[in-house]
Amino acid sequence: MAKKSTVDLSAHERLGVYSVRNYEKDGEEKSKWTQIGTAFGCKDGSLNVVLDHVPLGGATINIRPFRERPAAE
């Protein structure tokens, strides 16, 4: 059975949508996360998802609370 989400998605103004690819490098398992869009929680608990990119080749899509990246200096 799938694990229930512990995040109230409707409480977040903006959520990050990421493509996650697992790969192996030097015998070590790694993951590459790429932001591919944004999601918005609706009052009824559903999500509106806006994709800027579409992952291909079996990547997992992960939606989680958005975190701003620090600006590059």
Image: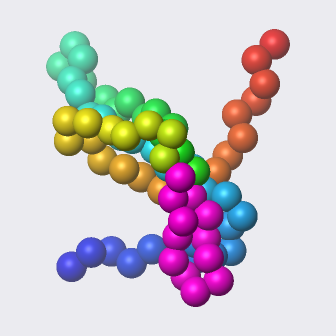
- Compared to residue 15, the image places residue 6 above or below, namely below
36 and 5: which is toward the camera: 36
Outermost residue toward the bottom in this view? 44
In this orientation, does residue 64 appear?
no
- Compared to residue 70, the image places residue 8 above or below, namely below
Residue at x 78% of width, y 24% of height = 71
Percent x, y of residue 56: 26, 36
Q: Quadrant of residue 24?
A: top left
Q: Which residues are magenta?
A: 39-50
Residue at x 55% of width, y 82% of height = 45
Which part of the image, by quadrant, shows the N terminus? bottom left
Q: Is residue 42 magenta?
A: yes
In this orientation, does residue 49 appear?
yes
Q: Is residue 35 left or right of residue 68?
A: left
Q: Is residue 58 magenta?
A: no
Residue at x 54% of width, y 65% of height = 48
Q: Is residue 24 left or right of residue 13?
A: left
Percent x, y of residue 41: 61, 70
Percent x, y of residue 3: 33, 74
Percent x, y of residue 47: 52, 70
Q: Quadrant of residue 8?
A: bottom right
- Compared to residue 58, the image places residue 29 above or below, namely above
How many marks the image carries: the answer is: 0
- Compared to residue 50, the image places residue 11 above or below, namely below
Which part of the image, by quadrant, shows the C terminus? top right
